[in-house]
Amino acid sequence: MEGGRHLADRTKSRSSKKPPSPSRRELTARLREAEETLRAIRSGEVDAIVVAGPRGEKVFTLEGADHIYRVFVERMNEGAAVLSRDHTILHCNGRFARLLGAALRSVIGSSLQGLVWPDDRASLDALLRRAARAPCRGEIRLQSQGAPLPVHVSLSPLRPGGTRAVCLIASDLTDVRGVEQELRASSEQLRNLAARLLSVREEERTRIAREIHDELGQSLTTMKLDISWLARRLSPRNGQMLQRIRATLRLADDLIKSVRRISTDLRPGILDLGLSAAVEWQAQEFQARTGIPCKLRLLAEEVVVAPDVSTALFRILQETLTNVARHARATRTEVVLERQREGLALSIRDDGRGFDPVDPSLSKSLGLLGIRERAAMLGGRVSISSTPGKGTRITAWIPLASSQESPATP
């Protein structure tokens, strides 16, 4: 019994001993650890805390404003990354890694230069230099599983805690480029269709003009000759009948002039004599009709060009002079036709009231739109320069293929 009592007293003595108190050094270390943890929580570097308890480890997730922001970044449809001063990727979301076709862990820590298509590295360098000072945007190609991937990048400088970094947002342009390609193809098809319709219309106008001139014009001329023959054989005593015949002859003359005018409006036959002759004739017609002096400067040597080129330039001249007569309030005009960079350039200048070339209403002008389309269909272009109160200059340039041009023979 006594031995058992001593054993129980020793056991009670051991169980009642308190654990040794931590030293000052241990307390200081724990305090520093707690302060570092608190700092990390406040700065957003920690998403969760693991606490060891009597029932095992317990995870506490931090779901504050910073957590919501991180979830937002991860679920973005655009790639996002943070670059260090030497352009190393410090952090990126899953979308950015998927754009590269790589695992997230292999992207973080990589140099952005190594992830860009080699031909675009100089462009990236320029963008990064600009981004160090101010936000900027551009287009580059990433290396996505060995193939170039076009992206639009937006870069902004970051200075968290005094550290220099760059935020990058990348948007995949593959779908956009596909849509752009489809639009270009559709536009090209529409332009080809418009060119074909315009060609058919010019051919039809030429046919109708010739038929009017040859058939109707000749018939009217024959009718006038027959009426004149009858008038010469009537006795002067038939004064009333002669008066009616003279009125009919005047009507026939007016009809013949109308036929010639309609035929010329459909397609001037002078185009068959060359573009310079047609331009000169049109300028003279404009001056006679409007009273506005028109100065001419034509080719020193006539050049034979394809009919579609001469017709296009002539129609551009017609439309431009019509606009001058209707809207410009000009007192003089100048028309210049010259060779320029393997093509023909037609320039029409007036001293009228001019206009603002960036005026949105001009996009609805069918006349200017038609001028541009005529030149574009033949691979040319049109430039329009104008200032309110200082006149307007319209220049159309159309290239000449070597097989289409040669000096005209007398």
Image: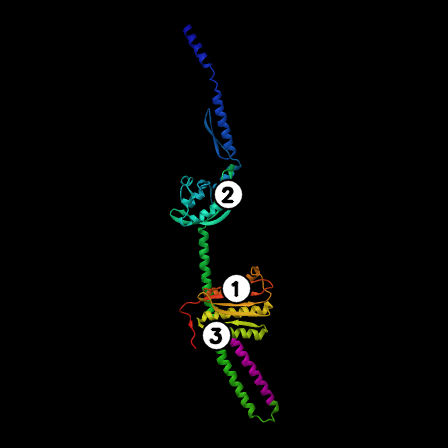
Please name the predominant secondary structure of the magenta segment in the image: helix
Amino acid tagged 2 = Pro
- The residue carrying mark 2 is 157
Q: Residue 186 at what x, y percent from top left?
A: 45, 60
Q: Count residues near mark 3 (Cα–Cα under 10 Å), then give few for <14, some for 14-19, many for 20+.
A: some
Mark found first going from the N terminus, 1 or 3 = 3
As helix, strand or loop, the secondary structure at mark 3 comes to helix
Tell me: 380 left or right of 333: left
Is residue 397 shown in magenta? no
Which of the two discs, 1 and 3, sits closer to the camera? 3
- The residue carrying mark 3 is 271
Mark found first going from the N terminus, 2 or 3 = 2
**Badge count:** 3
Q: Which residues are magenta?
A: 242-267
- The residue carrying mark 1 is 369
Mark found first going from the N terminus, 2 or 1 = 2
As helix, strand or loop, the secondary structure at mark 2 comes to strand
Q: CA distance from mark 1 to mark 3?
A: 24 Å
Q: Residue 168 at what x, y percent from top left?
A: 48, 44
Q: Residue 202 at what x, y percent from top left?
A: 48, 71
Q: Residue 8 at what x, y percent from top left?
A: 43, 10
- Taking the image as drawn, is residue 189 in sight? yes
As displayed, is residue 20 above or below residue 140?
A: above
| Between 88 and 193, the one nearer to me in the picture | 88
